Amino acid sequence: MKIDGRTRVCGLMGNPVEHTMSPVIHNTLAKAMGENLVYVPFHVPQGCVGDAVRGAFALNLMGMNVTVPYKSEVIPHLQELDPLARQIGAVNTLVRTGEGFKGYNTDMPGLRRAMESDGVRLEGEKVLILGAGGVARAVAILLAQERASQVVILNRTKERAQKIAEEVNGLLGRAFVRALSLTEYEQLPGEERYLAIQATSLGMYPHTEEAVLEDERFYRRIHTGYDLIFNPLETRFMKRVRAAGGKAFCGYKMLLYQGIIAYELWTGRPVEDPLAEKVYGEMLRQMGR
């Protein structure tokens, strides 16, 4: 592409950023849609988040993505916050406004669109969430918005799962989420099968032989497993779900769609399904698939 005085710049701030796939997503979109836009990763040292946000605004950047470990730390430096990002307590997309940046969370809408693409429904579904970190909390909020029927958080430490359940139930004003320890999964009704969302880092490269649970009886309770990890493309959790007869998906399409939604926020232009599939193919090609 031709870079000139009219070229707009978007980027990613995080630490580390060296192996990010975000430039593949956004630069492929910009080229396909004819946008005079380039996307660049920026390694931001610890303690420099506020400087990075102010610098991005001063340099007239159109927008930014935010990745670990700054998704919560960036919030005090923003001019405005989208209600979903406020609820979740994490921001991954900054959109330029007249006075600063407005923060959004496109991770959870990205997960919803990824699941739709994979034919996984949420409305009326009984869901298990594995893990009790910030991602699990965000997933529980998404499931409430998408009208899942019930949610159980399973975590090694039950107290952490209970804390998230209480927070989400407090936000909703009703009992929607319950908490169990991993070893208590047998308390689930024996006839039920669940959608299970794996929201921990266990199984991520290079520790690809790890899984939250190994018990085969647990995996027979799952009709569909969705692992939010995207490297490797098939985790041990996914293998165990498939071996027990269920369907399994990884988080790579979530990565795709959170980027697409950010791009749509920056440019105001919708990304249609054929182009999304083209970008996904380019991501896989870059991964050597």
Image (tube, rainbow, N blue to C red):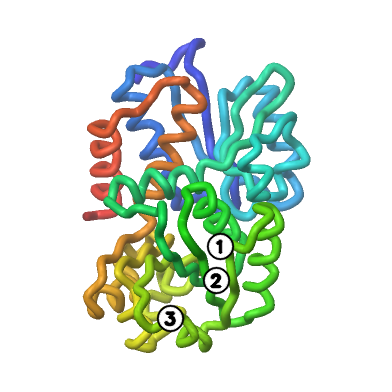
Q: Marks 1 and 3: which is nearer the front?
A: 3
User: Are the residues flagged by discs 2 and 1 in contact, CB closer than 8 Å?
Assistant: yes
**Closer to the camera, 22 or 111?**
111
**Closer to the camera, 135 or 235?**
135
Q: Quadrant of the C terminus?
A: bottom left
- Disc 3 crowd, CA 10 A, few/some/many (<14, 14-19, 20+): few
Which residue is depicted at the point 55% across and 39% down? Answer: 65
Q: Is residue 79 left or right of residue 287?
A: right
Which residue is depicted at the point 49% across and 85% down? Answer: 187
Check disc 2 and report the residue beneath it.
153
Residue 183 x, y percent position in the rendering: 51, 88
Q: Which amino acid type is shown beneath numbered disc 3?
A: Pro
User: Are the residues flagged by discs 1 and 3 in contact, CB closer than 8 Å?
Assistant: no
- Disc 2 crowd, CA 10 A, few/some/many (<14, 14-19, 20+): many
User: Are the residues flagged by discs 3 and 2 in contact, CB closer than 8 Å?
Assistant: no
Residue furthest top as drawn: 5
Check disc 3 and report the residue beneath it.
189
Q: Marks 3 and 2: which is nearer the front?
A: 3
Residue 71 x, y percent position in the rendering: 64, 49
Q: Quadrant of the N terminus?
A: top left
- For residue 43, say whether it is visible: yes
Q: Which amino acid type is shown beneath numbered disc 1?
A: Ala
Residue at disc 3, secondary structure: loop
Which residue is depicted at the point 40% across and 42% down? Answer: 257
Check disc 1 and report the residue beneath it.
136
Q: Which amino acid type is shown beneath numbered disc 2?
A: Ile
